[in-house]
Amino acid sequence: RGGGLHCRQAQGCEGVTLERYAAYKDSGVEWIGEIPEGWTKSKLKYIGNYINGFAFKPSDWSSVGLPIIRIQDVTGSSDSPNYYSGEIDKRYLVNPGDLLVSWAATIGAFRWRDDIAWLNQHIFKAQMNEAVCQKSYAYWLLSASIDELDHENKHGIMMAHLTGSVFNNFEVVLPPIVEQKAISSYLDKKTAEIDEIVGEVERSIGLLR
């Protein structure tokens, strides 16, 4: 939000400090608040293309071919994927590192970390216009946007689904590209540190048991 993340160094996280900018302006958007001078706002529909997955039917499922990415596959709640061995439009292919947004049941933004796969319905593949929004920054931007949409629409109760109109017209903030890279690098490093701490605690609990 409008606290301002200022980075001394754009590459990596060494030398990164957090401080307020010299000047701020009103974004005109309640959830964003004030933003630093030089930052802009936009709507999600203007900074990327969001492809909904293919409507696979149970009769399409197979035990061979490429896996089908369902919501339970992006959330990690399933280790038994379905597969599809046919041919459909290549726009439904998901590659490692692609950004995905589940818009039904479990709402959230995810980085796909597994092998190439087909995308099922109820999930968007986010193809960002990297001239205005870097892919690395977009992951954090989409995550924050979905958190805010959930708060606005259900007062903290998880949404049953996210409509395309609400998603596309949601207003977001865009720092300059160099700052987007620094912000995402900083957040990636900090969350990796947290994940490592959580992993150590879980291993300790296992040993205690």
Image: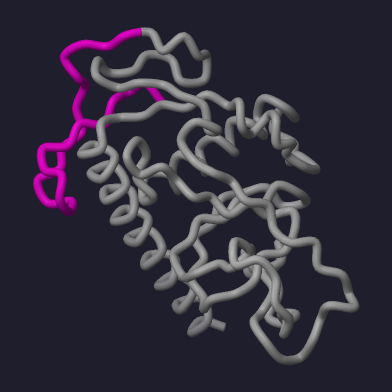
Please name whichever residue, 165 or 1, is drawn nearer the observer in this view of the structure: 165
User: What residue is at 74 percent from the left and 36 percent from the top?
Assistant: 163
Q: Which residues are magenta?
A: 1-25
User: What residue is at 46 percent from the left and 70 percent from the top?
Assistant: 96
The answer to whether residue 52 is left or right of residue 7 is: right
Tell me where residue 47 appears, x and y as whole percent.
46, 35
Task: Classify 99 as above or below 93.
Answer: above
The answer to whether residue 76 is left or right of residue 140 is: right
Task: Classify 105 as above or below 156.
Answer: below
Tell me where residue 101 appears, x and y as whole percent.
60, 50
- Please tell me whether the stretch drawn in magenta is mainly helix, strand or loop: loop
User: What residue is at 57 percent from the left and 55 percent from the top?
Assistant: 100
Task: Classify 148 as above or below 81.
Answer: above
Q: Look at the image and say whether residue 13 sits in the magenta stretch.
A: yes
Q: Look at the image and say whether residue 102 sits in the magenta stretch.
A: no
User: What residue is at 34 percent from the left and 18 percent from the top?
Assistant: 35
Tell me where residue 51 appears, x and y as whole percent.
62, 51
The answer to whether residue 95 is left or right of residue 136 is: right
Colour scheme of the rendered structure: one colour
Task: Classify 47 as above or below 4.
Answer: below
Please name whichever residue, 171 or 150, is drawn nearer the observer in this view of the structure: 171
Q: Residue furthest bottom?
A: 64
Q: Quadrant of the N terminus?
A: top left
- Asked which quadrant contains residue 130, the reply is top left
Q: Quadrant of the C terminus?
A: bottom right
Say how many tags the image has.
0
Tell me where residue 97 appears, x and y as whole percent.
44, 64
